[in-house]
């Protein structure tokens, strides 16, 4: 796991309701994931949709989502 990429994901309780954002900007991880889900390419995101981002930011969002979804689920017997 590339922890340097994850350092791009920031949390501030006074910004965007404490949701995970990218490099202390008001761009939420979910904003990027929704663009990707709607067929926007990473290149389009950084060049057209959210030009303040870098390609590593998009990769960081995907890594963050993968980590959040890959958690163990415990079931009671």
Image (tube, rainbow, N blue to C red):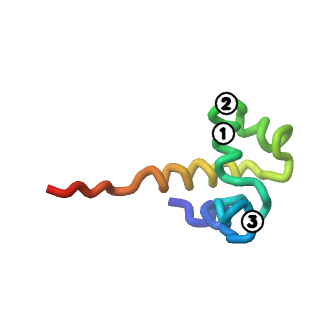
**Which class describes the residues within 10 Å of circle 1: few (<14), some (14-19), or many (20+)?**
few
Q: Which mark is residue 15?
A: 3
Residue drawn at the location 63% of the way across and 54% of the way down: 60
Give above or below for 11 relative to 73: below
Q: Separation of disc 2 and disc 1 at Cα?
A: 6 Å
Name the image quarter holding the C terminus: bottom left
N-terminal-most mark, 1 or 3: 3
Q: Nearer the viewer, residue 11 or 8?
A: 11
Residue drawn at the location 66% of the way across and 68% of the way down: 11
Residue drawn at the location 63% of the way across and 34% of the way down: 37
Mark 2 vs 1: CB contact within 8 A: yes
Q: Which one is in front in this view, the residue at disc 3 or the one at disc 2?
A: 3
Find numbered disc 1 in the image and state the secondary structure of the residue it sits on. Answer: helix
Q: Which quadrant of the view contains residue 4?
A: bottom right
**Which class describes the residues within 10 Å of circle 3: few (<14), some (14-19), or many (20+)?**
some
Q: Is residue 62 left or right of residue 35?
A: left
Residue drawn at the location 60% of the way across and 62% of the way down: 6
Picture coordinates of residue 5 (x, y %)?
63, 60
Q: Which quadrant of the view contains residue 72?
A: bottom left
Q: Separation of disc 1 and disc 3 at Cα?
A: 19 Å
Give above or below for 54 relative to 20: above
Give above or below for 59 relative to 34: below
Picture coordinates of residue 63 (x, y %)?
56, 52
Q: Which one is in front in this view, the residue at disc 1 or the one at disc 3?
A: 3
N-terminal-most mark, 3 or 2: 3
On the image, numbered disc 2 is attached to which residue?
A: 38
Count numbered badges in the picture. Answer: 3
Find numbered disc 2 in the image and state the secondary structure of the residue it sits on. Answer: loop
Picture coordinates of residue 43 (x, y %)?
76, 38
On the image, numbered disc 1 is attached to which residue?
A: 34
Q: Which quadrant of the view contains residue 35?
A: top right
């Amino acid at each position: 796991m590339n922890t340097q990429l994850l350092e791009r994901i920031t949390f501030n309780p006074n910004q965007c309701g404490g949701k995970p954002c990218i490099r202390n900007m008001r761009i939420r991880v979910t904003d990027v994931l929704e663009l990707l889900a709607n067929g926007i390419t990473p290149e389009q995101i950084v060049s057209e949709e959210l030009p303040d981002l870098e390609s590593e930011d998009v990769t960081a969002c995907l890594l963050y989502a993968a980590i959040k979804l890959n958690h163990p689920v415990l079931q009671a017997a």
